[in-house]
Amino acid sequence: MISLKEICRGLPLNPLPENRGRRKGIPHAPVRTPNLTAQEKKLALRNALRYFPPDIQKKLVLEFAEELRLYGHIYMYRFFPDIEMRAYPIEDYPCKTKSAAAIMLMIMNNLDPSVAQFPQELVTYGGNGQVFSNWAQFWLAMQYLSEMTEEQTLVMYSGHPLGLFPSHRYAPRLVITNGMVIPNYSSRDEYEKLFALGVTMYGQMTAGSYCYIGPQGIVHGTVLTVLNAGRRYLKAEDLSGKVFVTSGLGGMSGAQAKAAVIAGCVGIIAEVDEAALMKRYKQGWLMEISNDLDHCIARLRDARKNKIALSLGYHGNVVDLWERLAYELDTTGELLADLGSDQTSCHNPFSGGYYPVQLGFEEAKQLLSTNPGKFRTLVQESLRRHVAAINRLTDKGMFFWDYGNAFLLEAQRAGADVEKKGANKTEFKYPSYVQHIMGDIFSLGFGPFRWVCTSGDPQDLATTDSIAMSVLEDSIRQGVSTSVKQQYHDNIRWIREAGRHSLVVGSQARILYSDQRGRVSIATAINRAIAEGRIKAPVVLSRDHHDVSGTDSPYRETSNIYDGSAFCADMAVQNFVGDAFRGATWVALHNGGGVGCYRLEIAANYIFLNGFS
């Protein structure tokens, strides 16, 4: 094992590390099929080799060509670092500035195998949310960060470190752009090609901006979504005995199991990938697992009847689960599901984000690499069946929403029955979670407020939890509107439950939703606690795409904007630029997020390092 000091020395070239290839025993990204021409393959190789001196290029060219042939991308497996990849305490990083050390901590957290979906391919979540495009970029970025001063800024261009540039201490230490492809070429096929060439990268929301906090981030949002769905659709404050059916137990979707239990309902979550299922089960995020639909239906009925909070992972295709629920309705007249959604990576349906029901998981992966056209056909057939079963249940009273993963958009393209008559082109038969559930919360100025305790000490996290609850309770006592009061109460409940449910995966992090009043008060109180020594090290504060102006995404964050501007991207760009001169430690601008790089979705992230001067 190498040390952090060695990581910061730059690319290891003399001697070259041993090429161990893909490691066994960890999940790997699906094979990509960029369909490069012979000339484009040469260009991809040239672009990959530019990180190395000429004498080293000769040693690497054949293995890089083989990676491109086998996997559709050059990840540079030889340079996968032999280190325990995790968020180390901030004082462990050999840096000239705390800001740089915090960035390094957050990068390593995104690549921690307990956090990342495909760690060797540098994918944090969502099937293709990259931290970097290849491992050379990781080494170079860490070297630049170790050398950075408070009067320099590191500029990242879709994973590629452009270098350190002169700036000043009040400027961002890091500026990131990812996937900024011009509109005429921002399509799925072009993106796959440009990524294979090494010239662009899909950073999802918080993968390529280095501020992912593990699935906890979406657990919180999912808890609020399920609670408010119950209020809106079921007129219920208490969700005990109510059944929530969905799919996905990956990097982001894995949050659904915990969220269901915290919300107090029965959650049945389908997952085709046994590795993802077992990861969540071993982490304690899933209470039970089964590959037997008869058993799942029996457990559902029992938990529903006895009002037991349950998270049950079904190892199988969600279409089979939905069709079985429709069969139960047809044969017994019993509607077993009250709420439904979907968190497959449907923004990436033809590259491993959605697996067709007609094939087993391994068989489908093989078809994806050998016959992507046939795979696409089967996916679209599966989507039509998927929607047909959901429609059968909603006709009898179940409520379904799109979780911002482009499920309804891809279902529509597949010819499924999701049309809403007389609607505009951002609306479907079922609402997005923003339109009917979270939009009301956003309109109050509420959005995600996340923090990471860079000491790595769980006691620091407990202290920040206590501070956040106290601040929100004080705000309620001072007087707020009824709607704001309800959201404060939901978030106080969340923090209490989060501590009990062991939600930390990776860095010592927490998330809540708050309005400006709450955010400013919490940040100020955390700063005081650091100054007083009650918190041992600086705290990273971040917002993300659910910020009220953080993302222009017509099928998600701006899906309830009806003045025609839902397809315009000014808001997120202005957010990014404005935060750069309002004191953010680092800022990121992405084309693409949860619903894909190949349609208009511009997302801004901004991060502050709290507690030092």
Image (spheres, rainbow, N blue to C red):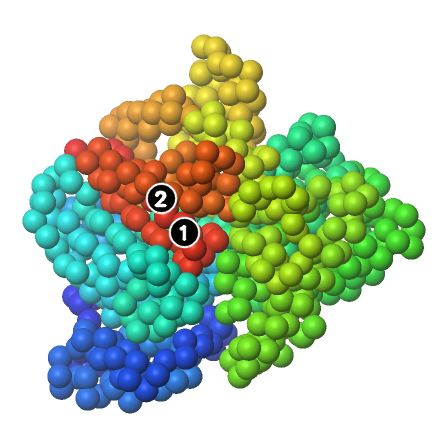
Amino acid at the residue labelled 1:
Leu
The numbered disc on residue 306 is: none
Residue 609 visible in this rendered orientation of the protein:
no
Give me the residue at 21% from left, 49% from top.
174
Amino acid at the residue labelled 2:
Ala
The numbered disc on residue 569 is: 2
Q: In front: 419, or 410?
A: 419
Q: In front: 341, or 311?
A: 341
Rendering quarter of residue 409:
bottom right
Give me the residue at 79% from left, 45% from top.
395
75 up-or-down from 251: above or below: below
Rendering quarter of residue 543:
top left
Task: Evaluate if marks 2 and 1 touch, with contact meaning CB atoms under 8 Å apart.
Answer: yes
Q: Position of residue 512 (x, y in %)?
A: 46, 34
Which residue is tagged 1?
600
Cα distance in 3D space between marks 2 and 1: 8 Å
